[in-house]
Every structure is written in C-alpha cells, then in structure tokens.
Amino acid sequence: MSAEPAPSIAIAPKRKSAFLSEPAILIPSVVLGLLVLVALFAPFLGTIDPTQFDPTLRNKLPGHVGTVRALDGTETPFVYRMGTDNLGRDIYSRVIYGTRISLIVGALVALVSTILGLTIGLVAGYVRWLDGFVMRIMDGLMAIPPILLAIALVSLSRAGLVAVIIAIAVPDIPRVVRLVRAVVLSIREEPYVEAAITAGTPTPTLLVRHILPNCIAPLIVQATFVCASAILVESILSFLGVGLPPEEPSWGNIMAAGRQYFRIFPHNILFPGIFIAATVLCVNVLGDALRDRLDPKLRKRV
Amino acid sequence: MADVLAVDRLTVALPPGSDRDHAVEDVSLKVGAGEIVCVVGESGSGKSVTAFTVMGLLPREVKPVGGSILLEGEELLSATPRRMRELRGARMAMIFQEPMTALNPVKTIGDQIEETLTVHTNMSSAERRARALETVEAVHLPDPQRILNAYPHQLSGGQRQRAMIAGALVLDPALLIADEPTTALDVTTQAQILKLVAELRARRGTGVLFITHDFGVVAEIAHRVVVMQKGRVVEQGPADDVLNRPQHSYTQMLIGAVPSLTPPARAPLDASPVVLQTKNLCKTYASGGLFQKKHVTRAAQNVTIDVRRGETVGIVGESGSGKSTVARCVARLIDPTSGEIAIDGVDYAKASERVLRPQRKRMQIVFQDPYRSLNPRRTVARSLIEAPVNFGMGEQAALSRARDLLALVGLSPSALDRYPHQFSGGQRQRICIARALMVEPEVLIADEAVSALDVSVQAQVLKLLDDVRARFHLALLFITHDLRVAAQICDRIVVMQKGTVVEQGATAEIFAAPQHPYTKALFAAAPGKHIGSKVTA
Amino acid sequence: MLSYIARRLVQTVPVMLIVAVFVFLMLRIGPNDPASILAGDNANAEQVAAIRQNLGLDRPLLSQLFVWLGAILTGDFGESFFFKKQVSALILDRLEPTFMLALCTIVLAVVVAVPLGVIAAMRRGSLIDRLVMGFSVMGFSVPVFVIGYALIYVFAIKLNWLPVQGYSRLADGLPAFLRSIALPSMTLAIIYVALLARMTRTSVLEVLGEDYIRTAYSRGLTPLQVLVRHALPNAAVPIVTVIGLGVALLIGGVVVTESVFAIPGLGRLTVDAVLARDFPTIQAIILLFSFVYVMVNLVIDIAYTFFDPRIRY
C-alpha cells in the first residue's frame, strides 16, 4: 500500500509534450488512418466481389486455393486467405469491404448525435423554461436501455444504412445533451460569462462566443466514445440479423453468417472479430488519451 | 523554554520543470513549549511547504534535500514512515484551512476524534468516548454529546474548525501546526478560534506553529514572527519587534500594505447628485415543493441604498449577509424579487432583457476571482472591446480606447494581444477594471474585487480603484467582508447581516462609534487593531 | 424517509410515461401498419379493415393511447402477433433465465471488479494498475458475442468442461444450472467488470485527493487504515451509482448473450419479436426492461441515504 497523502501545495505543472509524440495518441491514429485507407481502396487490395457466392466453395478453410469466375466466364486462380463462408463468399473480401460500413457508421453516428445533442444541450442549458421539458424527454429516452432502443428502432423500417445510423444515434443523443447541458450550467456561472452579460452581449452571441468553446473538448472526447460504441452496436444489430442485409458486408453480418458452423469453422468469427476489436480498441484508446489531455475533469463521468 | 520544534537550514526541492528549484531554502525556525510562532508570507512564500515538511505530509514529488527538523529533540527527516505515523496525531498534530473539506463527510465528529485514540492507544471504547467528550468540551462546543453524534455538514464552519482542533489536541501533542486555520472563516468566528488557540496553548503548554498571510492575525496571537519570501526566511524575531520595527524592506513593505482600521478624512459629497438608488430591494429563494416543506431563504430584505456621483459606498458583512446578492441584483445578474433599482431615476429592477440591454453600459462590475473573470480563450483586446462594440462603437475606436485605459491602469499596450494566463492575479484585476471602464459607466460595482489578492497587490489595486473613481466621477459600490479595506476606500458604509441592513452612515462616524450591536461585535472581532496604514491617501 | 421514497417514486412516473408514449408512438408513426402485419401477406383490403376496427386502430390517436395505457396498467399487453398468445404470459414464461443470468452476472462482476479497481487506485501507475486499465479498455472494445464464442471455443469445445449452449432451470438441479449459466455470466460480466473496475479506480483516486484524507494521515493512520476507514465509505456512492447505470448495459448484453448461448429468455424473445415484427411483444419488452432499469436506479438512489448522511430526504 503506497498511497500518498494528498498534495495540497500547488506545483507548477509539467510542460505538455507535443500532441502526436504521445504513443497513446500516435499509435491508434496511425492504425485508424490505415483502416480508412483500407476502406477507400478496398477494390485494389486483392479482393473480389464480396457478395459473389459459389456453392462449390462453401466453408473453405483459410488459405484455400480456388478459382474465381468473372462475368465473362473466364476463371482465374484465387487464394481464399481467410477462407469462405457458408455460401462460398470470400471472407477476406467481405472483411475488407466491411471496414467501409463500420467506419461510416462510427463516424456518422458520432457526427449526428454530437451535432443534435450539442444543439439541444445548448438550448436546454441556457433557455430556462425549455430546460425542464427537454430534460424530462431525455430522461425518458435514457430510461430505455440503448441497445434495446436501437433494436426497436431498426425494426420500424426496412434495414438499411440510414436506418441503422439513425437507430444507433438516437439513444446516444440524450447522453450528449446531458454532457453539454452540464458544461453550459457550470460555465454560465463563470464570472467572465457574467461580465459578458453586463457587457450587453446578446444571448446567441454569448452562447457561441463564451460557452460553446468550452463544450468542444469534452464533446470531442465524447464523440470518440460514441463512435466506438456505434461500431460495436452496428455489429451487434447485424449479428442479431436486424441490421444490415448480407448484400452489404459488415463485420457483424459476416459473423452472423458464421454462427451456424462456428464449432467447425471458427474462422468465420475470428477474422472479423479481430478487425472489429482492433478498430474499437484504437478508438477507445484514442478517446482515453484525448480525455486525459483535453479534459481531466471528465474522468468523473464515464 | 525547551524547544518543541527546531527546524535548521531546511531545504525542500521542487520537481524538475517547476518555476523554481526549491520550495523552501535554508529555513531555520524554533517553536518553544507554550509559544505561538507565526509564519507569514504571501502566496508562494513556502510557508505551507515548511509546515507539511514537518508533518511528513509532502506530496511524493516534493522532497526535503537538506537540513534537519527536530521534534522534542528527535530527528524527523530520517525517521521511518512507521515512526512518523506514531508521532503524527500523538506528538504533533495539524489543523487546516478549510474546515468544510478537512473532515470526512460520512463519519460522525465523535468517530473522527476517537480515531486518533484508536490508532495510538489501547483505550476501551468507553474510555475513548469519555476522552472525546472531554476534548469537545475543552474547545467550548455547545451540547458536546450531540456534537459527537453529528456529521460535519450539520455543523457551522466555526464549529467544524473547533471539532478539528479537538481532534488534533485529543492526545495533547507537543506541537500544533495550524495552516491558515481562520482564513475561510468570518471575522467574528475567526476571533473566537484565535482566542481558543491562545487559551489551549496557555492551558496545555502546546507549541503552535501558525501559518498565516494576515498581519492582523499575527498581531493578535503571535509571540514570535517568521517572515518568508520566495522560500526563504527574510526576518524573524519577537512579535513586537517585527511588527513595530521591521528591519527587512520586504517586511516593511508587507506591513505598510496592510490597510488601517482608522478611516482617513474624506471630503463630504452631499452636493453631488445621487446616481444609483435601491428602494426596498428584496431577493428571496424558495425551495421545496409537493412532498417537502416549503423553504424560503431571504437573501436580501428591504435594502435601501443610494450612491452619489464620485462616492464610494461599501457594503460590509460576513458570509450570508446578502451583500453579494445586492451587488448581483444591481448588476441585474439575478432578478430581484421586489423593490426598485434605479440609475438616474430610471428604475430597471423589473426591466426585460431587451429594455435592460442599453442600460447595462451604465453599470459595470468587477468580480472577486481574477483567474475566472477573463475568458481564457480570448485575447485581452477582444475581452476589452466586447462591450463597446456591442453598444455600437467601431472596432478601431474601441481598440484605441482600450490602449488608453490599459495605460491608465498601469499596463503597457502590448498587453492587448496577450492572453489572460500570461498575467498575474493583480494584473488581471487591472485588466478587469479597464474592461469595466470601456463603456464609460456611471456606476462601478466591485464585488470583493481585492479579496483574492496578496496584501501588497491589494493595496495597489485599491489605490487604482480609488483613482478611477475620482477621475471618472464614478458611483462606486464596493462589496467587501474586510473592514480594513472598507475603512480605507469608502465614504459611507452599509453594514448588512442576514439579508438586512443593520446600520449605515459615514465611514468615519461608524468606525468611531458603531451603534448597532452587530456592528460593534464585528469591529470588536477585527484582529490586530493597532497595526496598519493608510493605503489610498 | 417515507416521504423521500414517495417523492422519488412520484418522480419516476413522468419518466415511465414518456417511455410509454414513445413506445406507443413508435408503432403508430412508423411506416408499419399493425393491421396489415397481422392480416398477413395474402389478406384483402376488407380483412385488413376488419382487423383495424377490431384493434381500435380507426379511433383517434389520443383515445387509442389512453385505452392502451389503461390496458397496460392492468397488465394487459395485448396478444402477440407471432406467438398468438397473451404477451404477459409469454414474458412470464421467459423471465427466469434472464433474471438468473442478470443476477449471476452482477454478483460475479461486483466481486471481481471492485477489488480490482481499488487495488489499481492504491497502486496507481504500477503494473497492476496498467493491467487492470488495459483489461478495462479491452472489455469495452470486443463485441459481447465475440467474447461469448471465444469462451465457448475454449471451455466448451476445446476443454469440454462446460456445455456449449442451452439453459437448465434451477428447478432441474443446482449443478446443471450452474454449468449452464457459467459461460453466459462470464461473457456478460466482462463488459460490466470493465466499466465497474474503471469507475471504482476513478472514484477511489478522486476520494484519495480529498482534504479529509490528508487529515486522516495527519492523525497517524496507515495507508490501509485511510483506505478502509475514509476512502471506501466515500467512494461507495459513485461506485453503487455505476452498478445501477451499468444495468442498461447489462440489459443490452442479455439480448446478445442469450442469442449466442441459445437461452430461452427475454433477450431471445426480443430478437424473435423484432424479426417477426411482433409489435405488442416488442412494446411490452421495452416497457418492462425500462421499468426494471428505472426501479433499480430508484432503489439505488434510496440506498444512498444509507451511505451518505448528507443526502437530505
């Protein structure tokens, strides 16, 4: 047991090192950058059509050498690096193309829920008569466990990328609203905000000029965590069969396809599982590092 | 007199990358049995580090690197952690600045006092209880049995500090270290705690190492005084010598900056027109509702004040007196519940924000905390021109005015392009004063504007406020808890207690002959009455 | 105290009402027509209209809402489109496995996570701390079902210690029950442990920075005494709060875990109902889970008064 008494004496803080020289920021940034490249250049990474199935090539193990038939009927030899699934689709190609879906879902959900949450939170935090009403609605939304809400929302319409993004973003909005509102409520007590009030600064300007900048750092941190959880939730939805249809390969539905024969062919789940875990891990590590750096007080909230 | 504590050439290193190498350097001091030694200095002088080094409670990064500390002849710097634990609480004890946070909120006072006994003795639980009760009685806490069973939040600030003292003295330590123990307390409570410390020291023969920044407190209780500056002892000696015949220029400067409790003569302002007027101003807060008893707090009740052009009116009171509530109502940062607030006869107490906005340039405010009063993300220039630009002034004209005003408050125009963190607390407060003057207000509100500053800086900012008041014929509404400051700067003072005005009148008259019992008690509690000098003259 | 509980109970009413209205509107304003789903693909317009009238769907929205709310208050959630039986009976049937899974998970998670978090906080910056924090980030990053399959692969398929899938009721014997619940609980506990260990560490660290900790040291207490007497009692409130908030995470995880382990509980029912667009069942499950979540947090709020004398009631 080596806990030390609380430091009660102010010590000049150590100078912060350059942003990217910190491994916890640099490494995940590089990995995520590579994943973006993979998503962008998926067709040029030795992939074939990820939706093309071949009954003769069902459930092949990784490394299987077979042939691919092009539209004009010519056949070329092809190595199935990660094997094939129960319909004979190339898992490697599906995983590479699946990167697109995961990154798009993660980024868009983070963007949508942050922008909507920021707007609602600013208004709720500053317009007193709206606050009670808005926050009761948010409390109600937060009372529904998020994955359950997402599942229920996707069930409302035909599964598609837009529906999935909306379904995942909606449960996150009240959490962003709460964060923004908390920041607004604490900042509006700051003397410099009160000084701006006595300076006759109109409320909208006050919000944008003095309060909004304080929301940016915690929001960036929150957005990374929303992004990480969105990638996970998308995979869960697809895995349960309520997310994206198999024609749009996502890491979740690759694994869903592999469920049946999991005992014999675990590679169906292994490869997309590794990709998703690595991606989400990078986003989370980045989020942690950003939080420690941008907003140490945020540690309190999860 | 045997020395309880002997610190000899103590040097404590700061971690690399700090603003200086040593927190304290070559510090030597002694505390005899039954003696109160005050260590005085401004922030950053190393006085707290010295105290924490003795207790062995320094944070890990800060290490003593030289010298020696003898407690009753025993070397502490080389003592094992185990031996230090045996000494802490038993032979030396400590009380802290914030009685609010220094007690564990989820344990009763009794548990926390008895804890020391549990750790250091083999007493039975009944013996511990009896000892705790005895100690609580010794610090004059009312209804000791109830206090033992109470939680900290159920006690007032003064009671909490008494409970802290009881916990520190329960095993009769030879040395009591008090780190600014009265700084967070109101002046009347402070007087009681100082009396208690002096009494216990006399009765038990405890040596007291008393850390403070307040020369009034020093004058009240110290036998000997140690003056520290930037980690070094610049002067020490018997209290009488140091306070009345200071040798070192720094000590002379510090004592010279303490405002006197005797108000200077001021020219009467009866002919000047009234600018700001409040009539029966009330502010109440209501809480509770459906299942709870309605609880109404009257923060301000029927406050009627007027301030003439060129006049400084001080609102004086302890925490909870409602003085800041009045200031914030006048600035319309909060909405008054009832009553009138008028500038030049125009009542704006109930004005809507739209009607109010053009009025706002007529009243500006300077806040207490210089570190939070300026938006850290905006340059000084942008903070200064915000108000005039809002009220229609061109940006260039505003910038040129900003330059003039910065010069007026004693800063160079190059300050415009810098950010608040590049300035000291006193400089920031100057910037805030310049900002308030940008729109040529008629009323300036200073809400504890010098309370967070070190005494030497405080004197300069006070002088600046008085200068700008005279120069611009401002009506200055000056909120303070500090009678010394009020005595020096105010033409008239308004004494508030629990939301009501108990007395108001010319400063000199009230200081010479207070009428209301509360005002009398307040003045009687002011420590070190005879020291201090005129700072605005 | 009683009035405090009453007040807190009353406060949950608007929250649950908003959930109910939301659940109601979700079906009505969505692109799905319950009548056509119920009628099936081959129904003609008249049949659909008849069903519509039968369900009361032709009445104004507000009166539908009140009728529906009234029915729910009496425990009538309607008839399942898919299973063709009362939803309430359907749910009762599936309650045990889900409840048992959740209970075992919470117990397992708390027993593992709280000590881990405390040790990490006490040894801040040490190898143990970094391992715990590393595990915590990992726990947040791997999808629940991947963890589930990994555990099945190791413990059920390779080592053959535990059954691969399925659920054995408690009534059918404790050993069989424990064997069937072990892997699902471990799967589900991982994310909970990740959350709880991290929050415990944060809370303890924060409390260790408080002034009264310094006071305790000044009385001569050892670090262990400071931890047990002062830090833990004060860290309890935030830790318990997170246990409550984590229930939302747990409920989401139950849905996935039950699918992986083929446990016939409410989670499986949720997925089946969504796939079959069985809206009365979906509505009932959302209401039930939200109600449980709100109630758990209500109980925890009331429990605070036990940990912290400052909380007024």
Image: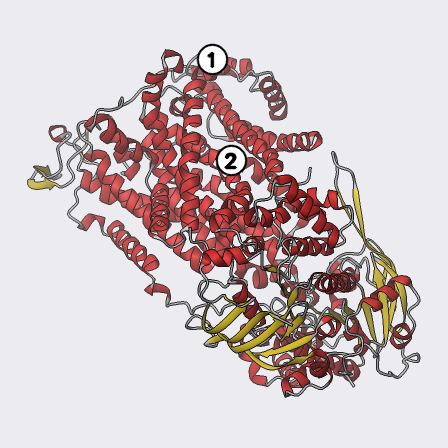
- In what quadrant of the picture does the N terminus of chain C appear? top right
Please say whether residue C29 is visible from this viewpoint: yes
- Residue nearest the observer in this picture, A292 or B328: A292
Type of the residue with mark 1 = Gln
User: In the rendered structure, the residue with mark 2 lies on which chain?
Assistant: C
**Against B459, is A86 above or below?**
above
User: In the rendered structure, the residue with mark 1 lies on which chain?
Assistant: C
- Residue nearest the observer in this picture, B381 or A285: A285
x and y percentages locating residue C257 in the rendered image: 35, 28
Q: CA distance from mark 2 to mark 1?
A: 47 Å
Mark 2 — residue? C244
x and y percentages locating residue B281 in the rendered image: 85, 59
Tell me the crowding category of disc 1: few under 14, some 14 to 19, or many 20 or more residues within 10 angstroms, Cα based.
Answer: some
Mark 1 — residue? C47
- Residue nearest the observer in this picture, B12 or B330: B12
Q: Is residue B361 left or right of residue B228?
A: right
Q: Earlier in the sequence, mark 2 or mark 1?
A: 1
Residue occupying image coordinates x 51% and y 24%: C288
**Against C63, is B279 above or below?**
below
Q: Quadrant of residue A248?
A: top left
Instruction: Give the number of the disc on residue B243.
Output: none
- Mark 2 secondary-structure assignment: helix
Residue occupying image coordinates x 75% and y 81%: B468
Type of the residue with mark 2 = Gly
- In what quadrant of the picture does the C terminus of chain C appear? top right
